[in-house]
Image (tube, rainbow, N blue to C red):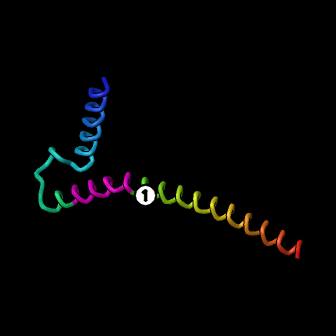
Amino acid sequence: MTQRLANVGITIVRGTFDFVTGYGRKEFKEADWLQRVIYLETIAGVPGMVAAMHRHMRSLVIFFSFFLLLSSLLLFFFLTFFLFL
């Protein structure tokens, strides 16, 4: 069932891409092929960019969480040191 659903999904996406780029409706020249390849590579880069941005944001959250913990511990130790001085 899942393979059939994946096949139907890919067929729909491929058909839409062929329709948008004009593939099969006219004789393709070099400029048409170039436009089709550039469009395909542009769309193919989006999932990787989204994944990289998600990973970067998650790393920032972890970093700032650690930074807040470290700064609060340092503040606690400095305050206790100066209180007992």
Predominant SS of the magenta segment: helix
Residue 74: percent from the left, percent from the top? Answer: 73, 69
**Residue at x 22% of width, y 45% of height:** 18
Q: Is 44 included in the stretch rendered in magenta?
A: yes
**Residue at x 24% of width, y 50% of height:** 21
Secondary structure of the residue carrying numbered label 1:
helix
The answer to whether residue 16 is above or below residue 79 is above
Binning the other alpha carbons within 10 Å of mark 1 as few (below 14), some (14 to 19) or many (20 upward) gives few
The total number of labels drawn is 1
Residue 83: percent from the left, percent from the top? Answer: 89, 72
The answer to whether residue 8 is above or below residue 42 is above
Q: What residue is shown with label 1? A: 52
Q: Give the extent of the magenta segment.
A: 35-48
Q: Is residue 34 left or right of residue 8?
A: left
Question: What's under tag 1, amino acid-wise?
Answer: Ala
Residue 55: percent from the left, percent from the top? Answer: 47, 56
Residue ranking furthest to the front: 85
60 or 79: nearer the eye? 79
Quarter assignment of residue 52: bottom left
43 or 77: nearer the eye? 77
Residue 58: percent from the left, percent from the top? Answer: 53, 55
The answer to whether residue 82 is above or below residue 63 is below
